[in-house]
Amino acid sequence: MKKKSNAGLKTPGSKIAVIDGFLSVLYTDSGTFKSLTKRTVFRFYTEHPDLLTLHGWSSDSDIYHDDPNIKLNEGSLTNFQYGNKTYFGNLVLKINDLKKIKRQIKTDFKSVLFVPLDPQATDQGGQITYDIQLTNDDPLIVPFSSTPTGVSLNPSPPRNSG
């Protein structure tokens, strides 16, 4: 029997690196976004060590398929950091907000942007969330012009509104 090596294991008390980095603007094309028809729950997903992105599942109930209905792409990097004292919870796009954004898209916008808010700002309380905006510009090139939708992804559990 071959002896196993413990070289890669950490012992209690040893320093372990916590996930940290900078948030990116995330995006999808408007056609993919318009294909969503139900409340969508987004979960954080790491593509590689430098990318924290979102994948979303649509459902009217709490039953979801294995594969996500939408995967957001990485756009431009922001100076908003995540790491210690940051919540990585699900984010919810409610059906009424989805419909509102789809009405605004019509055929006038090429991309839907998920623009992060600073999770360390006092009013965010460590929650990572995103304002949803629309653009015809390339989301990879900064600066880009965008149109706010008035919709933000809602952390789950939700933040208090007042």
Image (spheres, helix red, strand yellow):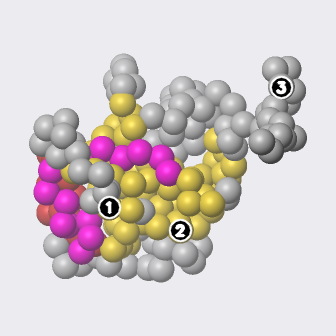
Residue at 56% in and 53% down = 46
| Residue holding disc 1 | 70
Residue at 67%, 58% in the rendered image: 50
- Closest to the observer: 3 or 47? 3
* Span shown in magenta: 31-45
Q: Which of 123 and 93 is in front in this view?
A: 93
Number of on-image labels: 3
Query: Closer to us: mark 1 or mark 3?
Result: 3
**Spatial CA span between label 2 and label 3:** 38 Å
Q: In this view, does 124 lie above or below 132?
A: above
Amino acid carrying mark 2 in the image: Gly
Mark 1 neighbour density, 10 Å: few (under 14) some (14–19) many (20 or more): some
Q: Position of residue 102 (x, y in %)?
A: 18, 62
Identify the residue shown where x is 47% and y is 47%. Answer: 44
Tell me whether circle 2 and circle 1 mark residues in contact (CB < 8 Å).
no
Discs 2/3, front: 3
- Judge the density around disc 2: few (<14), some (14-19), many (≥20) Cα neighbours within 10 Å: many
Image position of 154 with respect to 40: above or below: above
Which amino acid, mark 1? Ile
Q: Distance between the residues labelled 2 and 1?
A: 16 Å
